[in-house]
Image: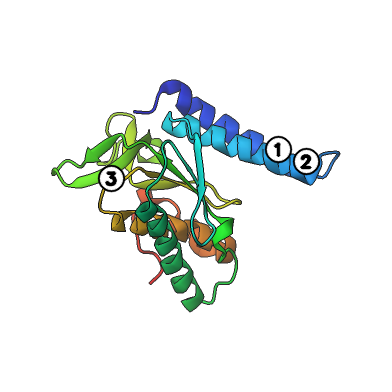
Amino acid sequence: MITRRQKYLFPVLMLALTCLLMFTGDGVKPADAQGRVEQIIQARAQAVTGDRFTVFRTTLRGANVYAVAAPKADTLRAIDDGLAELFAVARRHGYRARLDYSAYTVYIARADRVRDSRGAYSPDIAVSAGQYAGSVYDQGGFIYAAGMVLELNHCVLVIAEHEKDVRRVSDVVRYEGEHLILYHNDRALYNETADHSRGGGHPILQ
């Protein structure tokens, strides 16, 4: 469950990242700026999940993965498979930006639950309810999510750790990745579909 401190730290980190990106051209070397951006994004991931991501891997196709424990090979393949499906549907819609595996970073956090209310296997993370407060998803100030977008410009996602059913990993990466594809290719549709509290869900692109 996300803590009160984590809920307030998240917007502070967003503001810090925005300021950093605005001023990287003034006396900050590109390599230094990139390193600082990565540090801020990782701090955001830690604040949102309460986890420390001490393991770094790349998938066979080049996506970046940070995890709390070494991910299994089938999990890394599942991330690639989800991105492959995402890129295929993006191309069908004529989108061209952000169709490179290396542009994506996936954080794998510890699951805050492994079964849903019906008892089905469903590793999810607990995040602040935000705009979902008071909805059927509200669990008392937080909601359970299979995954979420952490940062738009650098295409960063966070998902829950899975011990089995890695097909679900592919689905989460593909569906959350839709927001990133739309942000970089179709801002109008992104704005219409980014907030699920207003209705709608995944898949957005078919």
Is label 2 in contact with label 1 (beta carbons under 8 Å)?
A: yes
Residue identifier under label 2:
23
Q: Residue sitting at 27 percent across and 33 percent down?
A: 139
The amino acid beneath tag 1 is: Cys
Say which quarter of the image contains residue 20. Answer: top right
Q: Nearer the viewer, residue 53 or 72?
A: 72
Q: Residues within 10 Å of mark 3 (few under 14, many from 20)?
A: few
- Identify the residue at image location x=60%, y=67%: 97
Q: Nearer the viewer, residue 183 or 193?
A: 183
Kind of residue at disc 3? Glu
Q: Give the CA separation, mark 2 to mark 1.
A: 6 Å
Residue 194 location (% of width, % of height): 45, 54
Q: Looking at the picture, does residue 163 appear above or below residue 193?
A: above
Q: Is residue 22 left or right of residue 120?
A: right
Which part of the image, by quadrant, shows the N terminus? Answer: top left
The label number, if any, that marks residue 163 in the structure image: 3
Compare marks 3 and 2 and give the one earlier in the sequence.
Answer: 2
SS for callout 3: loop
Left or right placement of residue 153 versus residue 181 in this view: right
Q: Residue at image x 58%, y 39%?
A: 41
As drawn, the label of residue 123 is none
Does any portion of residue 175 appear in the rendered image? no
Q: Residue furthest right?
A: 27
Work out how far the residue at label 1 is from the one at label 3, CA to CA, in angstroms.
38 Å
Locate the C terminus and report the quarter of the image it occupies: bottom left
Task: Name the residue: 59% across, 32% down.
Answer: 13
The residue beneath circle 1 is: 19
In the image: residue 167, left or right of residue 23? left
Q: Is residue 87 above or below residue 40?
A: below
The answer to whether the residue labelled 3 contacts the one labelled 2, judged by CB atoms less than 8 Å apart, is no
Give whichever of discs 1 and 3 has the lower sequence position: 1
Disc 1 is placed on an element classified as helix
